[in-house]
Image: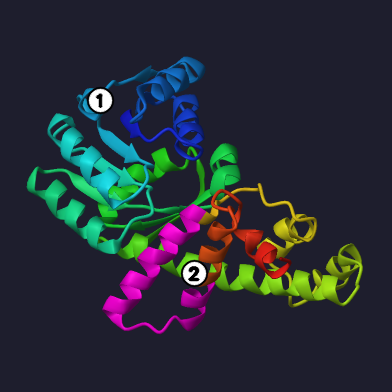
Amino acid sequence: MKIAFAGLGVMGAPMARHLVRAGHEVTGFNRTASKAQAWATQAGAAFGATAAQAAEGAEALILCVGNDDDVRTVVTEALPYLAADAVIVDHTTTSARLAREMAGRAATSGRVFLDAPVSGGQAGAENGQLSVMVGGDAEAVARMAPVLNAYSKAIQHMGPSGSGQLTKMVNQIAIAGVVQGLAEAVHFAQVAGLDTDAVYEAVSKGAAQSWQMDNRWKTAAQGRFDFGFAVDWMRKDLGLVLDEARANGARLAQTALVDQFYAEVQAMGGNRWDTSSLAARLNR
């Protein structure tokens, strides 16, 4: 498939490389043109100086950019240049409102927009093991599934436009609660004078076990927070969650509290620390 891929950061660059390795004709685009050129040289692919140039004749436009405004800008510029029946797949975490807006805009030009946020982080992107939650037209999801399989281990169609983004919000709500619990558990173990490695061995095989515990307990106990999804990104995502909750009436007291805790981590200079850095604010 002829694909334009917009957003070649820590997630997008390896995802786009997987597409090249799978045999697709990929043209990369990044707001910083030098980054797109460097990616293209490394991947053995092409790059476009603009989103329009990258999208020329593409059967699919895949995005992994920053926020609602970034998605709107790229789609607006690229849409007229895509193939007549192209599918737009947005892996950016955005508002559900934006997803519905873009779906409507794409439909008026005969194209299809899928909101398809991912979970699995940088490691998942690099290893081709992302989980994708998709909102939008079922036939378009089926058409794109073989393409997305290049960097995904699971693809789940969630329903109409916006459903993928709403599902990603559920994901972030669950992570926020688990990471706060992990931070408090590590903190309590340290204050109680316990051997945190021994505590992990004791509790990680039972009901307390989680991905966060298996991957972040030991590094959090060591005060090491450079392992993945950054606090700035989590706060962006939780902002989307809390905005949606205000609109739909969901009561998210714990999520709102954890968002405040992440604001404290940012005030400590931890903007780029990973999400397990909630432990750092307890050890000040």
Seen at 63% across and 65% down, the residue is 278
Compared to residue 67, the image places residue 73 above or below, namely above
Taking depth in this image into account, of 233 and 37 the one nearest to the observer is 233
Seen at 52% across and 80% down, the residue is 254
Residue 238: assigned label: none
Residue 192 found in image quarter: bottom right
Residue furthest out toward the left: 108
Q: Position of residue 268 (x, y in %)?
A: 60, 58
Residue 259: assigned label: 2
Residue type, mark 1 in image: Thr
What residue does disc 1 label?
50
Q: Is residue 129 visible?
A: no
Residue type, mark 2 in image: Asp
**Horizontal side of residue 176 vs 208, given as left or right:** left
How crowded pointer 2 is (Cα within 10 Å; few <14, some 14-19, many 20+) is rated as many
Compared to residue 37, the image places residue 105 above or below, namely below
Q: Position of residue 112 (x, y in %)?
A: 20, 47
Q: Position of residue 236 (x, y in %)?
A: 41, 58
Q: Position of residue 184 (x, y in %)?
A: 71, 74
The numbered mark, 1 or 2, whose residue comes first in the sequence reads: 1
What is the magenta segment's predominant secondary structure?
helix
Please give the count of numbered marks on the rendered protein: 2
Taking depth in this image into account, of 89 and 153 the one nearest to the observer is 89
- Image quarter of the N terminus: top left
Q: Which residue range is magenta in the image?
A: 232-259
In three-dimensional space, the C-alpha distance between marks 1 and 2, rounded to whole angstroms, equals 36 Å
